[in-house]
Amino acid sequence: MDFGPFFLLAAMEGAVGAAVLAVTALGLSLVFGVMRVVNVAHGEFYMLGAVIAWWVTSLLGVHPALGFLAALIVSPLIVGAIAGAAERLVLTRIHYDPEATIVATIGMLYIIQQAVLMTYGPDARPVQPPFDFRIQLPWFGYSGYKLFVILAAALLMLAVWWGLTRTRVGLMMRATQFDRETARAFAIPVDTVYGGVFAVGAMLAALGAVLVTPIQQAHYLMGHDPLLLSFIVVIIGGLGSLRGTVLAAVIIGMSDGIISVFFSPTLAKIIATLAVAFVLVWRPQGLFGERPA
Amino acid sequence: MLMVESLDCGYGATQVLRDFSLAVDRGEILCLLGRNGAGKTTALKAIMGLVKPSAGRVLVDGTDVAQLPAEAAPLHGLGYVPQGRRLFAELSVAENLEIGLMAGDKAGRGGPAAARRDDALALFPVLRERLNQRAGTLSGGEQQMLAIARALCLEPSVLLLDEPTEGLMPAMIARIREVVEELRRREVAILLVEQRVDAVLQIANRVLFVENGRSRETVEAERLRAEPALLDRYVGVGH
């Protein structure tokens, strides 16, 4: 294959990765932005989303499209419920103390991971894609499902943006983010907002994972890379900035995909991590982050 | 309307308010006067439930809100204009107002949201031209107007204002004073923390002196105007 088509293929792979990464990182960004909680367990919510997607589709045993649709609804709901419960049981008890939340979410990481290992096992299991449509380009055929992933991720991002900027719930979240005390003085139930934001953040990770399971298999250790890349994206984009998160996800996801195809996935991670170092040196608040007052 | 009875509260081990009491009626302005650190701001925060009292009651129309979570205070008709304005600086003017309107909707207070919003904007017409601007980019005076308008959006029966004229130009101070007087005419109970004694004497019905976290005497403003010597005792010379 010539360089041009080869590059196009690499870019398309990168775009799929970027799309999933954007959704996953947005969850992490939202939780940090509103609650100032560094959620180290975010990757495990992602993994849990994928495992539950496998579980739902194999348990139902219906047509792949129906099974996938069911997973797309059920998996985020279960993950959201687990995350919400964890927030109530753990994070409220330690009063969101920054150091304590890091340690607590590391604890959650291992509990979730080991619980999945004990029940689901160490195997990687695939989910059937909802449809087998291939788009035939002049040089190669490409999975229609992967293009669907990009579209679905874009729609999800639009939905989150709309929810944050155009609804009252979103306004409550943003008010809580900017001034917790004044928000309470205006009848905003900050505790409920926190619980909800943590659950929604985990649900976004789960959604990203459900989208990915027909491409990658569900495995109990699959949460590591998304966690690392999400942190990279959130730091480069600027903590709590929706625009920055999306832009950084596109940059990192695309470069990760392209470099992985041409060179190696390890080199891609090295370059991404290096990019974080440079951003931290020259623009610590991220591309779109607000400079702390 | 608002009655505070022997409130004790503080931050952690530091007690700030001791046996603090006050009462404000509808259509009345009660000013808190006292030196820096006397506990005036803490008193307002305690009334709003933002600092949890260890003893005492905060009665709004007979309901004790001291034991309720902080987000319940606005639902009982308490509007708060905090010190330093505390706007949601990243949000637009319209969104800041919307937060006040939301609180009013939850409380089921006053008329429909649109009417409450028009009402608040009628008092500060300049905000109408700034609705899509980020609150943080407004001038100091406009920010203060927005902070008051935001509180008015929940149509409060009690309004707490913490140094609303701090650092403002004379014209702006006059405008804010007019609005506060207008609210008194509308039978709102107003609790005002204000440093400038001349401003207090012009606007207050009664003045409560605060000293070392305790509420001392409450004096009719008229009497203070006649006997300024009383002032020296609580706020010191030079005023």
Image (cartoon, coloured by chain):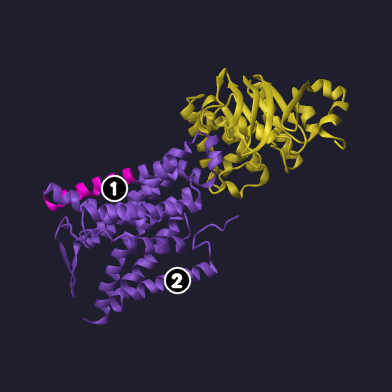
Mark 1 to mark 2 CA distance (whole Å): 31 Å
- Left or right position of A40 against B26: left
Residue hosting label 2: A275
Residue hosting label 1: A76
Report x, y in % for residue A261: 28, 75
Same chain under badges 1 and 2? The reply is yes
Q: Is mark 2 on a helix, strand or loop?
A: helix
Magenta segment: does it hold A193? Answer: no
Q: Residue furthest top?
A: B62
**Front in this rendered view, residue B235 or A2:** B235
Q: Is residue A167 visible?
A: no
Report x, y in % for residue B176: 69, 34
Dot 2 amino acid type: Ala
Magenta segment: does it hold A66? Answer: yes
Q: Which residue is drawn at 54% across and 29% down?
A: B74
Classify A205 as above or below B75: below
- Letter of the purple chain: A
- Letter of the yellow chain: B
For residue A230, which quarter of the picture? bottom left
Magenta span: A62-82
